[in-house]
């Protein structure tokens, strides 16, 4: 028996509604709920199976019931039934406008004269929906060309930079871990193995070129003796690595490249080299530093401008 909406439309539509409802009410983050939560996928599978099973049962019942009717009852039923969705007049009009296809009875109007072994060709027009979509892609291409290649608006690289800037802004608004809040006033030397290992890694990559891997000094000063050019102690070393040396521009500020926590690790590692006295170390430079509770930042000493220093320079 005919139905207003056929089952092949009704079943997917109902399934899509339930699927959309689950996605809306279940917070699954950046992944679909049926992927993140296996039970949701199981529910959807069972639900779809039941929908199909119900449709099969209903269709079977309709067929059995229809065959039990008398001819007169069948005729009355067919006259009383609503015309199916696909047979409705307004639906046929929409299809005709979107496709402009000719009915089979009128195909002779568009039949071409070509004949290939009895096979003839129809001169059907392109479907309007396809033509309009093609025109839309041309318009889109023109707008894209003018916007990004003529007016030189932002490109993908700039869009990436903007997204990174937005992400950094959002990150800055997040509450910070107090353990990461290290400054000149609060810095202390750390002695745990993980921090010293991190400091050694950074020192090897950024500082060893001028101070040697063992801290004995090359163009930069020896970091293993008790003499310091810019003052010793964790606070002065932390400040020197963070802000650079005023005595020598080659010792640049590293606060833009290293986090305060990393600078603390490097400074602590440098201090851990005290007294190691590696072979081939440079002669001592600067003055002996004595750590006291009241120690203030050492005044910038007047040094030879030809000296070259890198991160963790003295």
Image (cartoon, grey):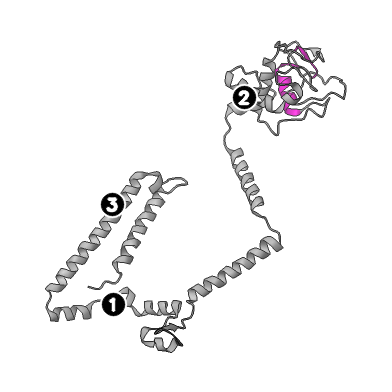
Tell me the residue at 15%/69% (across/down): 64
Residue at which label 3 appears: 46
Q: Quadrant of the N terminus?
A: bottom left
Residue at which label 1 appears: 83
Looking at the image, is mark 2 or mark 1 earlier in the sequence? 1
Stretch of the chain drawn in magenta: 225-243
Q: How many marks?
A: 3
SS for callout 3: helix
- Is disc 2 in contact with disc 1, using a CB cutoff of under 8 Å? no
SS for callout 1: loop
On the rendered structure, is 56 left or right of 18? left
Q: For the residues carrying marks 3 and 1, which lies nearer the camera in this image?
A: 3
Label placed on residue 198: 2
Asked whether residue 96 is in view, the answer is yes
- Is disc 3 in contact with disc 1, using a CB cutoff of under 8 Å? no
SS for callout 2: helix
Task: For label 1, count other residues whose C-alpha is less than 10 Å away and answer few (under 14), some (14-19) or many (20+).
Answer: some
For residue 206, what is the image quadrant?
top right
Looking at the image, is mark 3 or mark 2 earlier in the sequence? 3
Asked whether residue 311 is in view, the answer is no
């Amino acid at each position: 028996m005919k139905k207003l909406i056929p089952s092949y439309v009704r079943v997917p539509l109902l399934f899509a509604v339930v699927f959309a409802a689950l996605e809306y009410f279940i917070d699954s983050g950046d992944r679909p709920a049926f992927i993140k939560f296996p039970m949701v996928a199981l529910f959807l599978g069972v639900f779809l199976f039941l929908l199909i099973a119900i449709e099969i049962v209903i269709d079977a019942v309709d067929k059995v019931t229809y065959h039990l009717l008398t001819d007169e009852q069948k005729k009355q039923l067919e006259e009383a039934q609503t015309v199916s969705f696909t047979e409705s007049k307004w639906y046929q009009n929409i299809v005709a406008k979107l496709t402009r296809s000719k009915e089979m009875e009128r195909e002779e109007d568009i039949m071409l004269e070509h004949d290939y072994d009895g096979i003839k060709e129809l001169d059907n027009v392109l479907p309007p929906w396809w033509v309009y979509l093609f025109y839309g892609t041309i318009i889109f291409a023109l707008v894209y060309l003018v916007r990004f290649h003529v007016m030189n608006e932002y490109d993908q690289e700039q869009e990436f930079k903007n997204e990174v800037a937005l992400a950094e802004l959002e990150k800055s608004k997040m509450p910070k871990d107090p353990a990461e809040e290290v400054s000149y006033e609060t810095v202390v030397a750390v002695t745990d193995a993980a921090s010293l290992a991190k400091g050694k890694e950074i020192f090897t990559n950024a500082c060893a070129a001028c101070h040697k891997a063992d801290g004995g000094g090359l163009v930069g000063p020896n970091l293993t003796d008790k003499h310091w050019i810019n003052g010793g102690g964790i606070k002065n070393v932390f400040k020197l690595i963070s802000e650079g040396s005023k005595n020598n521009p080659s010792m640049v500020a590293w606060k833009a490249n290293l986090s305060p926590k990393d600078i603390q690790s490097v400074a602590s590692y440098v201090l851990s080299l005290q007294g190691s006295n590696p072979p081939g170390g440079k002669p001592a430079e600067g003055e002996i530093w004595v750590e006291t509770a009241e120690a203030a930042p050492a005044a910038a000493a007047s040094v030879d401008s030809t000296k070259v220093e890198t991160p963790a320079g003295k």
